[in-house]
Amino acid sequence: MVLYASDMTIESILAQIDSEIARLTQARALLSNVGRISTQVKSAAPSKSAVRRRKRVLSAEARKKIADAQRKRWAAQRAKAAKNSK
């Protein structure tokens, strides 16, 4: 990556350097943990039931809105079918 001082201010150059340092530090931390993770016992991994996501919950109002919209689509479909059958 080539930076030209005329294109950028010193503050933005420093900000980019800082972000690059943070990215490299994070990559190094991940790579240094790879050796430790591979030596752990596989049974220590969480089971699928422990990793399950929480169920999404809709409010009664939201369920009613969805149901009403679907009924409207079905009614339009029936009306179109009835019109085409005549």
Image (cartoon, rainbow, N blue to C red):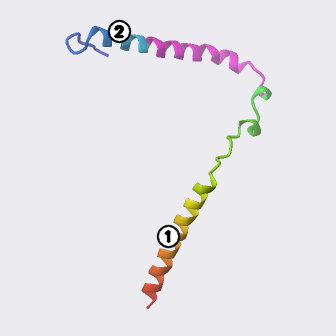
When the figure is inspected, residue 58 is found, relative to residue 80, above or below; the finding is above
Residue 62 in the image: state x and y as whole percent.
58, 55
Q: Amino acid at mark 1?
A: Arg
Tell me which secondary structure the magenta stretch mostly adopts. Answer: helix
Q: Residue drawn at (70%, 20%), measured in percent from left and top?
A: 38
Residue that carries the numbered disc 2 in the rendered image: 14
Residue 5 found in image quarter: top left
Q: Is residue 7 magenta?
A: no
Left or right: 54 in relation to 27:
right
How many badges with numbers are in the image? Answer: 2
Left or right: 81 in relation to 38:
left
Residue 24 in the image: state x and y as whole percent.
48, 14
Q: Residue drawn at (25%, 14%), measured in percent from left and top?
A: 8
Q: Amino acid at mark 2?
A: Leu
The N terminus, quarter of image: top left
Residue 11 in the image: state x and y as whole percent.
31, 10
- CB-based contact (under 8 Å), mark 1 and mark 2: no
The C terminus, quarter of image: bottom left
Q: Secondary structure at mark 2?
A: helix
Q: Earlier in the sequence, mark 1 or mark 2?
A: 2
- Mark seen at residue 73: 1
Tell me the crowding category of disc 2: few under 14, some 14 to 19, or many 20 or more residues within 10 angstroms, Cα based: few
Mark 1 vs mark 2, CA separation in Å = 56 Å
Please provide the residue range marked out in magenta: 21-42
